Image (cartoon, rainbow, N blue to C red):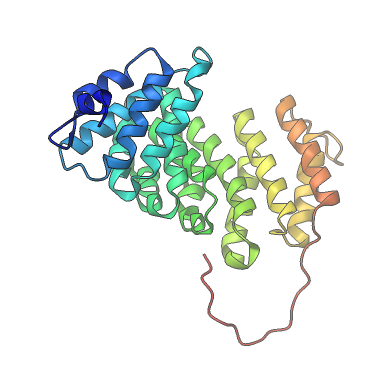
Amino acid sequence: MSAKNRSWSSGGRLDLDRIAADLAAADAATACRALDRLGPRLHRLREPEHHRAIEMVCSLLYIDAIDRPDFEEVLQRAMDVLADQGARVIPALLDQMRGSDIKSHTYLARILAMMGDPALPRLRNAIATADDPYVRTFALYALGKMTCRSVARALPEVIGSLMHPDREVRDSAARTLGKIATVVPRRLLTPRRRREMFETLVRAVRDVQPAVRAKAMRSLGKMAAAGLLNGRQRSALETSARAALGEADVYAWDNAYIVRREARETLDRLASGPAAPAARPRRTPRPTASF
């Protein structure tokens, strides 16, 4: 064993004090080596050492990669180390969301998204019960970053969030519905669920906040492109988009440019996206895991 490794361990145990010092070093290479040493052994630690080590790694998430571009690799490795811990670390990551800044929130949400299905129950609970709108917002952001089809299980919480009084929660919910529409195949979404998504987003297009209206319009376009809308819904969406652009029979120009831009892109999606599916003859259904 090298002298450096001996300084990191004592009697076969990790020297967390030394690793903490290296993670706090101004030199990115030193922090990377500390993560490489800690990562493979982190899951073997018992409490409270495991919790302490998680907090040490999470401290890296406060680094601004714009100010410190040399730490981009460190931040990616930190995310990988935390994501590899799986369900065990999820409560600690959610606790870290309370009182952290936007940089660390973004990284924490991305880590939870990397975990996928195991993080869903905790994220759904956070969206439904968290007192802090900031926590709800980033829990929704995490769902929007997920690529697992089971994210559809969170649709009730996401749809409900579009009625939240906080504009950032509504903004994030509108965005997340569009993300889910691009990840979950039509066959896994019941007609009722697709209708709920559509009707909720249509209401959000009339939100008082331009950013929410823009996200809702974008997500409706994504639903159209994914083939989640029927003919009536596509027609209603086209009318809504043209109204925002001042092209409808009833003049209803949206005074926010970001909404008009999204309306134009939505019309493009309607023109180039898949047509509404034709009705199929009834047949005995086979059991499927639909949401």
Q: What residue appears at the point 59 percent right and 40 percent down from the top-left corner?
A: 175
User: What residue is shown at x 17% (from left), y 43% (from top)?
Assistant: 46
Q: Quadrant of residue 61?
A: top left
Where's the N terminus, which quadrant? top left
Residue situated in front as seen by the camera: 36 or 234:
36
The reply to whether residue 133 is visible in this rendering is: no
Residue 264 on image: x %, y %: 81, 37
Residue drawn at the location 63% of the way across and 68% of the way down: 187
**Which residue is at the front of the view, 213 or 186?**
186
The answer to which image quadrant residue 260 occupies is: top right
Q: Give the farthest residue toward the left.
A: 11
Left or right position of 240 against 73: right
Q: Position of residue 88 (x, y in %)?
A: 28, 47
Q: In the rendered image, is residue 270 in sight?
A: yes
Near-viewer residue (122 or 165): 122
| Image height of 195 relative to 133, above or below | below
